[in-house]
């Protein structure tokens, strides 16, 4: 999913920026704000390192109400989504969720998203905030063509303007959520599986509760109407006060997802990349439907894109102290005896990739980065450098994710 690739902080509200229903709550907590995709969002409340560690050790509270919510409804809703997205959504059981992609005809990624099957005839599709309107428009265009071709009456509604999304992430998240739901629903929270959703009651309000997240920790996401968001935010803060629940902004969300090896649209994912280069095994070629981008993706798979040709996304572990950043070149090191025939032919310093995300890892204590690298240099343990403005810094290829919760 997505967070800002570049961030600028501001304290004074900009009338040109949209705000979530929780903007007042963030201001009371003294948040620093950032302009993200036209939204004024909390970047951090105190220290982004403290917020990061709170999620890893206890729990963090996030406002994600800038994300999109698109409802797809009808007896053939699953079949339609199978033509619009690369995954097999028709096979998804009620109450389950699936990570998927929406692509162009050429296989380029328009967005990564999560689809929840609410009932047999209803899905909730959650795209990234910056791509919400693009995804909604694409689904509306595709459903029109689907309905015309199949005599279907499937409907697509963009409900983003009426829904808030709050997340609780961290090892104590289940304890916190269990304490705010109705007493006879506590077992529902405890038994809810990963990438699953259900309806619970909190303070008399019906809430869609999903066990999903973007931090690498156990966690929950809660969908509810805007006018009920403030009460839920305050109830969660009170319930989590003894469990270390900490309000968290977008800054630590970005460092958390990077440690967990989760891609960021606009950095790791774009229309210039396919799922094969991104290392995302989410394309279902076994489903019958001719989904948008299928022919291009079948051709890319046949030519070994991201496996025997082109580039693929890898993790890079820093062997020094300095971190690489998005856009920095990945180059062959001065001494690269195992760098392959291409290195022997063209020598050290040759550019073999580009960093998509990078920063010091608060949890692991060393620099980490994700980068697209030529397929000849994918083997874990391969030594590569990141060119930090003319100063090569040593890294090595590692398998993603960098961090796995225990």
Image: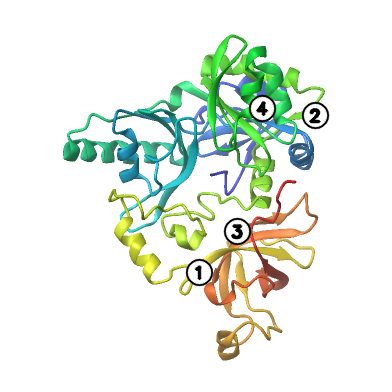
Residue 218, how many percent across, how many down? 67, 37
- Residue 244's disc number: 2
- Disc 4 and disc 2: Cα gap in Å? 20 Å
Residue of label 4: 190
Helix, strand or loop under label 4: helix
- Image coords of residue 9 (percent x, y): 65, 39
For residue 311, the mark is: 1
Whichever of labels 1 and 2 marks the residue nearer the N terminus, that label is: 2
- Mark 1 and mark 3: Cα distance apart in space: 16 Å
Q: Residues within 10 Å of mark 2 (few under 14, many from 20)?
A: some
How far apart, in angstroms, are the residues tagged by discs 1 and 2? Answer: 42 Å
Q: Residue at x 34, y 50 (%)?
A: 287
Compare marks 3 and 2 and give the one earlier in the sequence: 2
Which-is-in-front pick, marks 1 and 4? 4
Location of residue 271 with respect to 376 vertically, above or below: above
**Mark whose residue sits in front, 3 or 2:** 2
Q: Is residue 10 above or below residue 231?
A: below
């Amino acid at each position: 999913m997505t967070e800002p690739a570049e961030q600028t902080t501001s304290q004074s509200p900009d009338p040109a920026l949209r705000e979530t229903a929780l903007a007042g709550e963030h201001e009371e907590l003294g948040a620093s704000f950032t302009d993200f995709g036209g939204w004024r969002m909390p970047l951090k409340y105190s220290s982004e390192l403290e917020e990061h560690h709170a999620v890893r050790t206890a729990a963090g509270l996030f406002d994600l109400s800038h994300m999109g919510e698109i409802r797809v409804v009808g007896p053939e809703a699953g079949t339609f989504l199978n033509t619009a997205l690369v995954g097999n959504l028709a096979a998804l059981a009620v109450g389950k969720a699936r990570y998927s992609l929406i692509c162009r005809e050429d296989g380029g990624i328009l967005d990564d998203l999560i689809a929840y099957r609410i009932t047999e005839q209803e899905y909730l599709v959650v795209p990234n905030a910056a791509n919400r309107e693009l995804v909604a428009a694409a689904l509306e265009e595709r459903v029109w063509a689907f309905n015309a071709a199949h005599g279907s009456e499937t409907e697509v509604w963009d409900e983003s303007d009426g829904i808030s999304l709050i997340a609780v992430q961290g090892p104590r998240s289940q304890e916190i959520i269990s304490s705010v739901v109705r007493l006879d629903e506590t077992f529902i929270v405890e038994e809810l599986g990963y990438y699953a959703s259900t309806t619970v009651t909190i303070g008399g309000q019906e809430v869609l509760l999903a066990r999903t997240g973007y931090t690498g920790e156990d966690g929950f996401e809660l969908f509810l109407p805007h006018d009920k968001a403030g009460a839920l935010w305050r109830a969660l803060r009170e319930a989590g006060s003894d469990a270390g629940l900490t309000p968290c902004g977008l800054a630590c969300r970005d460092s958390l997802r990077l440690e967990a090896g989760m891609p960021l649209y606009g950095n790791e994912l774009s229309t210039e990349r396919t799922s094969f280069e991104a290392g995302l095994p989410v394309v279902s070629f076994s489903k019958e439907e001719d989904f948008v981008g299928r022919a291009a993706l079948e051709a890319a798979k046949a030519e070994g894109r991201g496996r025997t040709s082109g580039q693929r996304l890898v993790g890079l572990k820093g062997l020094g102290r300095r971190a690489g950043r998005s856009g920095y070149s990945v180059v062959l090191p001065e001494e690269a005896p195992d760098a392959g025939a291409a290195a022997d032919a063209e020598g050290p310093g040759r550019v073999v990739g580009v960093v998509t995300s990078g920063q010091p890892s608060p949890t692991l204590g060393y620099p980490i980065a994700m980068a697209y690298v030529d397929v000849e240099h994918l083997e874990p343990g391969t030594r590569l450098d990141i060119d930090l403005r003319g100063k090569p810094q040593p890294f090595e290829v590692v398998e993603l994710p960098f961090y796995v919760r225990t």
